[in-house]
Image (spheres, grey):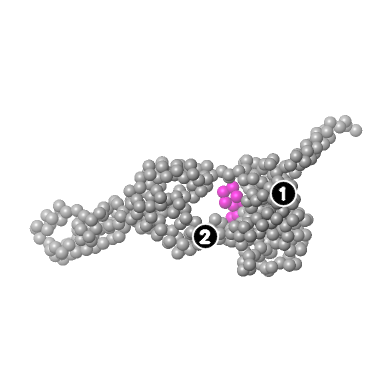
Amino acid sequence: MAKGDGVFKIRGDKIYVHGTINGKFYRKSTGKKVSAATKVWIKKTDPLKYLAEILGITNANENKSVYTFKEVALEAIEMQFNAKKITEKHYKDKLQSLENHAFPYFGDFLIDSITVKNVVDWINHLKENLSGSRAKFNKNLVASIFRYAQHDLQVLHRNVFETETVRLIEFDTKNVETEAYTAAEVRKILNESTGWLKVFLDLSFKYGFRPGEIMVLKWSDIDLERGILTLQRSLNKDCLIVEHNAKKGKTGNKKHFRRISLFESSKNLLKSFYEVRPNKEWLFVNKDGKPFMQSKSIIDYHLKPLLREIGVEYKTLYATRRSYASIMNFAGEDLEKIQEVMGHEKGSSVTQDHYITEDILSAEDLKKQAAKTEQLFDTFLQPDK
């Protein structure tokens, strides 16, 4: 409660009442003058209830909000968008999530009446029906709305999302096992692709770069003579370009800033592409000459049509990273080197647990690998000369 809330004040010979109702501070005249009788009346009267009567608010309570969850949620998301804290895409995504997952549960509830049990039941429902990462996204979205109600609107005096029970709920956000393109499919895709898409897929399959890193590559990031590519920017979840450097190029277990030595085949491909480059600044641009801000347009209008044409099943664009990790692992590359190129923290279990799979190998590939291993074994059995 703010200082001066719920009190009667005497100014001259008149009595005023001060207080905050539903997050708004009021200062009103009672219409009464100071006298022995009104002094007794002041002692017996609840100033906030009296203020509510003056204002005509019959259901006001100093610890309760008359705002519904839906009203607060829509205002909170609108404020984020207007302040340019989120993009239009993220704004629409949040609204859609609220419509699908939060409003059916909390929409018409007064926000201050939502209990810890209500929230726990809702989160359990999310965990049963959504992926771990999507359930966590919805939980964090609604938690941000409660913070807005508490700190910005000041209509919430107890935030259930700050209770220990809700705060300690865990989500299984491990990567859902995504299929990888097999070694045979990778060969076919790289052989059949053309133009800028061939370059894009070359960087995807041969180095396992994240799509959001490739989409915002600039020609200034590449030393074509030395064959060095520097990754120093990426797209975040709000589809905004984030610049990285050697000191501040890490988020959690993800390393964004890194310098990679290119294969000779990639270097030659990039040199050829440079001669016909559609843009002097960016490697990959859309029809408006701007870098792609969403991978969906690349997938829907370029990758999927190519895969349909050559008879390869679509397995997500991100699956190229699993193909890279698996191919390089079974080719005998050191795990730490794979992690360095992919932007994983050295020693992280994520690479082996979620990226490397034998599914990429055909029966013929397995035979080749067995023959290679057998040759190594036989080498140690050769007698000393």
Location of the N terminus by quadrant is bottom left
Q: Which residue is drawn at 42% across and 45% down?
A: 122
| Image location of residue 102, percent across then percent down | 42, 50
| Image location of residue 357, percent across then percent down | 67, 41
Q: Nearer the viewer, mark 2 or mark 1?
A: 1
Tag 1's secondary structure? Answer: helix
State which quadrant residue 360 falls in: top right
Q: How crowded is mark 1: few (under 14 residues within 10 Å), some or many (20 or more)?
A: some
Image marks 2 and 1: residues in contact by CB distance under 8 Å: no
Q: Which mark is residue 57?
A: none
Q: Is residue 254 magenta?
A: yes
Q: For the residue marked with disc 2, what is the amino acid?
A: Lys
Residue bearing the label numbered 2: 89
Residue 98 vs residue 353: left or right? Answer: left
Q: Which of 376 and 365 is in front in this view?
A: 365
Q: How many marks?
A: 2
Q: Report how far apart the C-alphas of labels 2 and 1 lie in the structure.
A: 33 Å
Q: Residue at x 57, y 51 (%)?
A: 251
Q: Residue at x 45, y 42 (%)?
A: 124
Residue 339 vs residue 77: left or right? Answer: right
Residue 121 in view: yes
Residue bearing the label numbered 1: 185
Tag 2's secondary structure? Answer: helix
Residue 158 vs residue 385: left or right? Answer: left
| Image location of residue 347, percent across then percent down | 64, 42
